[in-house]
Image (cartoon, grey):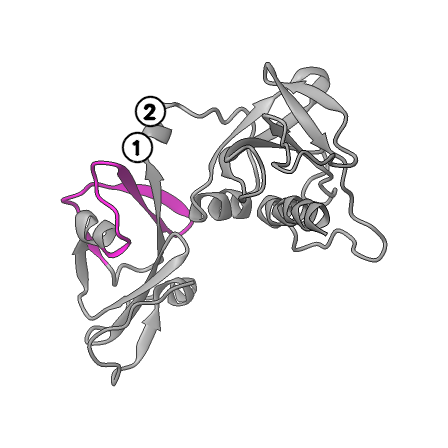
Amino acid sequence: MKTTKPETDDDEVIDLEKHAKSGKKLPCGKVYRFRVDAEFFETRETELTGREILARAGKGPDRWLLNQKVRGSVLTVGPDDVVDLTTPGLERFMTLPIDQIEGELRKEFALPEDDVDQLDANGFEWETVAGVRGQRWLLIHRFPISEGYRQKEVSVAIAIPPGYPSGQLDMVWVSPALELESGGKIPATQHSEVIDGKRFQRWSRHYTGANPWKPDYNVVTHLLLARAWFARELERSAA
């Protein structure tokens, strides 16, 4: 994660996200560290507009919507709205691409709050879809794929079991099917399934006794593991 620094760093730096747990108003005259998505920024200003916060993250209000998380609630911040960084309970900021909002991504069932926060903080374009026979799917759209595959981006589907997050996740499905530029075969991807009206390639990869599902794992850690699965096949094909 990247952190920008103020002109000098003589004063105490107060992290908004950590301080929010106290529920107290921040003292004035300090350096404030705040997070936008996965990046950290520092300022001595107590008030910033939505436009200024987006600019810190290299984004503009013509393409991005800014939200702030205050005491667990997510509130929209307009470009000219003034945000008081000393507001008690102010945790962080999240951005969403405007075209994602206009696409009206579905939320047909709820995910744990921590999953939602991490998916949004990482900028994923996602929706939850209730399938047939009680199936529940998390769909991640425009998931970038490394060079070495013929596809540059895919939709990734994760099956959400009834017991999640206590029950572990397993495998991923991708659409369109991934193909190596080398033409090599990818093992354990021969089966497919229709999800939300599209055919998805199943990547049959599982947690093991040596590398089990852990209580602090979630959909984002599972996505990172899937990225490692994709990278491993590139390494295997190059060997």
- Res. 98 mark: 1
Residue at x 65% of width, y 26% of height = 136
Residue 11: image location, x then y, percent: 25, 82
Q: Do we see residue 139 in this rendering?
A: no
Along the line of sight, which residue is nearer the eye, 91 or 122?
Answer: 122
Magenta includes 62?
yes
Horizontally, residue 1 falls left or right of residue 198, namely left
Horizontally, residue 129 falls left or right of residue 4, namely right
Vertical position of residue 221 compared to residue 185: above or below: below
Residue at x 59% of width, y 14% of height = 197
| Contact (Cβ within 8 Å) of mark 1 with mark 2 | yes
Along the line of sight, which residue is nearer the eye, 231 or 41?
Answer: 231
Mark 2 lies on residue: 102
SS for dot 2 = helix
Residue 114: image location, x then y, percent: 53, 48
Residue 96: image location, x then y, percent: 35, 39
Residue at x 39% of width, y 23% of height = 104
Residue at x 68% of width, y 15% of height = 132
In magenta, the rendered stretch is 56-84
